[in-house]
Amino acid sequence: MFGTENRQAQGRVLRYPSRVVSAYSLALSPLIRMSSPRLCQAVTLVALVVATGCDAVFTPPFTYAAVEVTVTLPDGVGVPDVPLVLYSGTRHLAYADTDSSGAAYFDFVAEGPTGVGASSTLFFRAAEHPDGYYRTFSVSEGDLVQVAFDFEDARGSIRLQVLDQMSQPVSGLDVELYTSLGVQIRQTLPASGSLLFSKLSPADYGVRVLGSGTCPLLPAGFVYRDRLGVGVQQDLSVEIVLPPCAV
C-alpha cells in the first residue's frame, strides 16, 4: 500500500514503509545539519540533562543527629531513673530514662529546634527551679548534641549528738536508726559522740542508744527518741543526754 525503500542487509532486502523513513529523517535532520562543534554541544547538553535528573533521583542519604543526656549531682555522681522526653515545640518525639550512670541517648533526631525535659524523682530534683528541668537547642544534620542537667539530692538527714550528765561527748556505745519497718542503720559512737545519718528517704524515724557492760543504761538498757519526721531536704539535729552509767 505504501511506497517502500530497499536496503541491502546481510544478503537480504529489507523493506521499510516510506512514511517511517520520512519520520526518522525529519527527527534526525536538525542534528545532521549541525556542524561538528554544534553537534557536540547538543550531545553534551543532553548528557547534562540526564545527569541532573539522576542527581534528583539518587540524592545523598540524610544523616540524622543524636542527643546525649547526662544527669548528675554536685559531686559528679550520675542520677539513675530520671524520666526524660525529647520534644519539638509541643510535640513529644521520644522518651527515655537515665541508666545507672545517669546517662541517656536519643538517636534518629531530625533537624530543627529541639528540647529535652527532665522530671524530678522521689529523691532527686533539679538544682534550679523550674528552669533546671528544660534544655532547648537547635539540631543540624549529623550533630551529636550533649545536654547536661544538674540535680540535687532531695533526701534528708538526722544528726545525733550524745552527751553525758556533764555535757561531755559519749563514745563507744552502739546507736540504731529505725523506722516502723525495723532497724535501718547501726553504728558506734565515735570520740566526738556525734553521728550523721544522711540520704534518708522521707519517713518517720527513731534513734536509740544501746547500753553496754560498762554503761548498761538501766532500767530499759537503752535511751531513745522517736517521731523524728524527715521530709524532702529536711535535716534534723537531735541531742540525747544519757543517765549516769551506774552498774
Image (cartoon, rainbow, N blue to C red):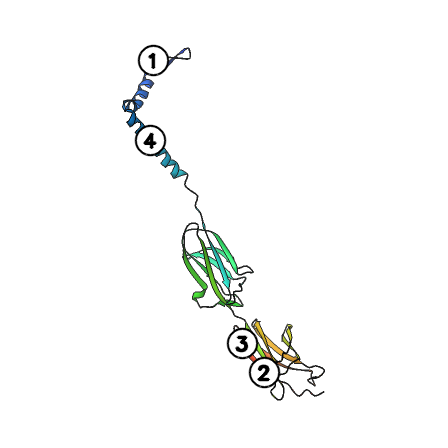
Callout 4: helix, strand or loop?
helix
Q: Relative to 222, is 45 on the left or the right?
A: left
| Residue 35, disc | none
Q: Relative to 235, is 40 on the left or the right?
A: left
Q: Position of residue 3 (x, y in %)?
A: 32, 13
| Residue 44, disc | 4
Mark earlier in primary sequence (4, 1)? 1
The three-letter code of the residue at mark 4 reads: Thr
Task: Check disc 4: other Cα within 10 Å, few if <14, some if 14-19, many if 20+.
Answer: few
The three-letter code of the residue at mark 3 reads: Asp
Q: Judge depth for marks 4 and 3 and give the one in front.
A: 4
Callout 2: helix, strand or loop?
strand
Residue 97 seen by the camera: no
Question: The N terminus lies in which quarter of the figure?
Answer: top left
Q: Position of residue 100 (x, y in %)?
A: 56, 60
The residue positioned 34% from the left and 13% from the top of the image is 5
The three-letter code of the residue at mark 2 reads: Glu
* Front residue of 200 and 168: 168
